[in-house]
Image (cartoon, helix red, strand yellow):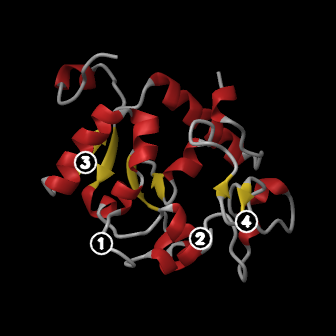
């Protein structure tokens, strides 16, 4: 892949970039496995007391489903980091229609509220392994420097064509309420 960081000519040629909002990335949400097990109890995949069956991927497991069929209580997602669907990897971040990663609308008031502000580490830092698995260490380090160290308002990830294709297929599956699959199966 060409070095596109800060290269306006490549951006003019239609190179896709996804913005990471510094304000959202610096939110202190404990999304580590310890935070999930001890604080929010996997509310992004199972949420007693509300109609979880309307949320994806939960709704893909049929009427009355109360959790994602791939969620294992006490250990998290049964997909490895290399297999996990992209939208699940990003959560509680979502990629909005303008190509910006923001925190899901219900995350801070519902599914993540028990893990919000429980420690000083930012959600972006908690997701280090995820960002590296998706975009590579070079991109993670650059975005981290921009928004965490230098406190810039935004920075950018540049997804590969493969990542863009995976997102297209997964978004179509979500629209059709189809079960997520190993992202390596997408060609």
The residue that mark 3 highlights is: 144
* Looking at the image, residue 66 lies above or below residue 21: below
Q: Which residue is disc 1 drawn over?
A: 120
- Secondary structure beneath disc 2? helix
Task: Find disc 2 in the rendering and name its residue.
Answer: 37
Q: Position of residue 83 (x, y in %)?
A: 63, 37
Residue 154 relative to residue 128: left or right? left
- Looking at the picture, does residue 149 appear above or below residue 131? below
Q: Earlier in the sequence, mark 3 or mark 1?
A: 1
The residue located at (39%, 52%) in the rendering is 101
Determine the image quadrant of residue 120.
bottom left
Would residue 186 be found to the left or right of residue 94 on screen? right
Badge 1, how many Cα within 10 Å: few under 14, some, many 20+?
Answer: few
10 Å crowding of disc 3: few (<14), some (14-19), many (20+) = many
Question: Which residue reaches farthest bottom?
Answer: 49
Q: Are marks 4 and 1 in contact (CB under 8 Å)?
A: no
Percent position of residue 184, x then y: 64, 28
Query: Earlier along the polypeptide chain: callout 1 or callout 2?
Result: 2
Task: Compare marks 4 and 2 and give the one earlier in the sequence.
Answer: 2
Q: Nearer the viewer, residue 102 or 48?
A: 48
**Residue tagged 4:** 54
């Amino acid at each position: 892949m060409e070095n596109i960081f800060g290269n306006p000519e490549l951006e003019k040629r239609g190179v896709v970039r996804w913005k990471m909002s510094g304000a959202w990335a610096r939110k202190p949400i404990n999304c580590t496995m310890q935070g999930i097990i001890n604080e929010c109890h996997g509310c992004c995949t199972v949420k007693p007391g509300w109609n979880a069956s309307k949320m994806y991927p939960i709704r893909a497991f049929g009427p009355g489903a109360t959790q994602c069929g791939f969620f294992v209580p006490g250990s998290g997602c049964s997909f490895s980091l290399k297999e996990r669907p992209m939208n699940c990897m990003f959560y509680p971040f979502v990629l909005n229609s303008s190509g910006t990663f923001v925190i899901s609308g219900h995350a801070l008031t519902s599914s993540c509220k028990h893990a919000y502000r429980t420690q000083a580490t930012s959600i972006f830092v908690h997701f280090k392994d995820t960002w590296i698995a998706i975009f590579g260490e070079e991109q993670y380090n650059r975005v981290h420097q921009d928004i965490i160290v230098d406190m810039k308002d935004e920075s950018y990830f540049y997804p590969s064509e493969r990542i863009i294709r995976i997102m297209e297929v997964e978004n179509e599956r979500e629209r059709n309420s189809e079960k997520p699959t190993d992202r390596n199966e997408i060609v």
